[in-house]
Image: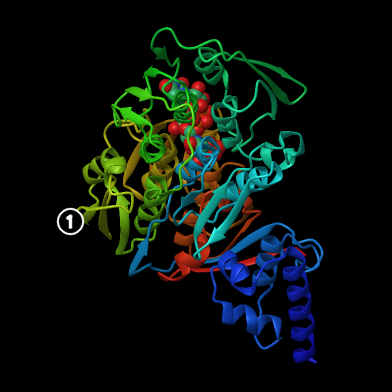
Amino acid sequence: MADDYLGRIGRLIRDARQHRGWTQLQLADALGTSQSAVNRIERGNQNISLEMIARIGEALDSEIVSLGYAGPMHLRVVGGRRLSGAIDVRTSKNACVALLCAALLNDGRTILRSVARIEEVYRILEVLSSIGVRARWVNGGDLEIVPPSRLELEAMDTEAARRTRSVIMFLGPLMHRFEQFTLPYAGGCDLGTRTVQPHMTALRQFGLEVAATQGFYHAQVDSSVSPTRAIVLTERGDTVTENALMAAARHDGVTVIRNASSNYMVQDLCFFLEELGVKVEGIGTTTLTVHGVPVIDRDVDYSPSEDPVEAMSLLAAAVVTGSELTIRRVPVEFLEIELAVLEEMGLDCERGLEYAAANGRTRLVDLTVRPSKLVSPIDKIHPMPFPGLNIDNVPFFAAIAASAQGSTLIHDWVYDNRAIYLTELTRLGASVKLLDPHRVLVEGPTRWRSAEMMCPPALRPAVVVLLAMLAAEGTSVLRNVYVINRGYEDLAERLNAVGARIETFRDI
Ligand SMILES: CC(=O)N[C@H]1[C@@H](OP(=O)(O)OP(=O)(O)OC[C@H]2O[C@@H](n3ccc(=O)[nH]c3=O)[C@H](O)[C@@H]2O)O[C@H](CO)[C@@H](O)[C@@H]1O
Ligand SMILES: C=C(OP(=O)(O)O)C(=O)O
């Protein structure tokens, strides 16, 4: 009976794969497994988990194989366990999505190496595929992107586009291809108001005018307009800097961008533009000078760098569980302030020798974190644009502060809502008092207790809750973790490999 069941599922998978026109190897690549494993699955010779069936369904875009509707994913966490061993940091969501948008600048073939397999990337891939871009996984984890001679913008998958904030970065590349186009409003984490006005102000100097009506941006480009002086960004934002860079990349002339973000994803984009033949001066500073190239048609390979925010998340996992854990491939330049603050709080951690990331530019270290008696910092924790403490790392300080002796003031001036979500930690036993929408006071240390709860609708606070569950004795349940999968690849499996016990389950 069981064999028959496996055989039937195998045949369904084979049919769906053939329908998609994929080889077994292509499916294996998409799943990060071997061709022989796919062969065994298709012949019914392999036990297959519900999770794997859901992944195959997603990869093949087949409702049959996903057993109808694969519902939201949840996590069951058996907490109170120490982590140990070593875990690698993967490539960053924020660089990967920017580079996928930047691939639209190139008429040639772009290969991005070891791209994070995360929902945010999947959404951008869905948008790219819907407009005719050939985007496919190759070599197990690389992405090959080849734009068609004409993008079919009218066919855009607007539902996928609305689920990400990153689609706003289509503005810069599309300006070079169309005099008129329409994009849906950008989504992303629910963090309160996130204006796109700085994007419009910057791109206006390249002739872009945007009218926003009924959920869409209607863009109009006057190609006779070009910047007559330096573009001064009204905010030192990451994606606005990336949009200005992409507009400048194919602008026939030299563009100076001031008040630019020099954050990690912006640096990755600059390195990629250099591969495309666009000279960028001032990388790592707040003034970027871009020597544009009107036509870019190159076959290029680029390796996005490791994610500093994932590194911070893993470090926080070690701290809250009182573990000794080595976090490998940490992009240390983008974690310097965080480490300095943590060392002041008493964190025992050791850095190995620096080595270069696969892009040859970003500096990495392996970092070993040891169980430490932490005390609260004297000054408040607050973010600043790079090289300040990373805005996306602030939430992790809530979990760390809850593990430290004393009270810590966390001031997230950037986002309207993110600090509010940190109060969810009280359900797991922490003392987190909301002073106003931007400030929380955390009193530690905490005796964590298990709980069952929904994910807050924001990526970093959701991961912070998961980390607290790892620390809490007993079994916790975290429901609807799409928001975590938006930015982290196989987080549960990878934490399990260093000693966590997290089970994934779905409503079917
Ligand atoms: C895809 C991507 O790369 N997303 C990142 C990017 O989003 P992104 O670049 O889209 O960030 P936003 O433009 O939303 O800026 C974040 C917030 O910071 C405020 N702000 C920003 C800069 C500044 O100089 N002054 C200021 O007030 C903005 O008004 C906004 O409220 O940057 C954010 C801030 O680092 C990160 O949280 C996101 O993970
Ligand atoms: C806020 C974040 O992402 P996004 O800009 O994609 O919403 C984040 O990465 O924490």
Q: Is residue 201 above or below residue 85?
A: above
Image quarter hosting the N terminus: bottom right
Q: Is residue 147 above or below residue 36?
A: above
Image quarter hosting the C terminus: bottom right
Q: Nearer the viewer, residue 73 or 196?
A: 196
Other-residue count near label 1 (Cα within 10 Å), few / some / many at <14 / 14–19 / ≥20:
few
Residue drawn at 39 percent across, 51 percent down: 303
Residue drawn at 36 percent across, 39 percent down: 271
Q: Is residue 134 above or below residue 253?
A: below
Q: Nearer the viewer, residue 80 or 88?
A: 88
Left or right of residue 483, residue 291 in this image: left
Whether label 1 lies within 8 Å of ligand 1 gets the answer no
One can see residue 376 in this view: no
Q: Position of residue 164 (x, y in %)?
A: 62, 39
Q: Nearer the viewer, residue 49 or 368?
A: 49
| Furthest residue in direction left, as rendered | 353
One can see residue 70 in this view: yes
Residue picked out by circle 1: 353
Left or right of residue 368, residue 136 in this image: right
Q: Position of residue 377 (x, y in %)?
A: 28, 38
Q: Quadrant of residue 185?
A: top right
Q: Is residue 364 above or below residue 290?
A: below
Secondary structure state at the residue bearing disc 1: loop
Residue drawn at 49 percent across, 39 percent down: 297
Residue drawn at 71 percent across, 86 percent down: 44
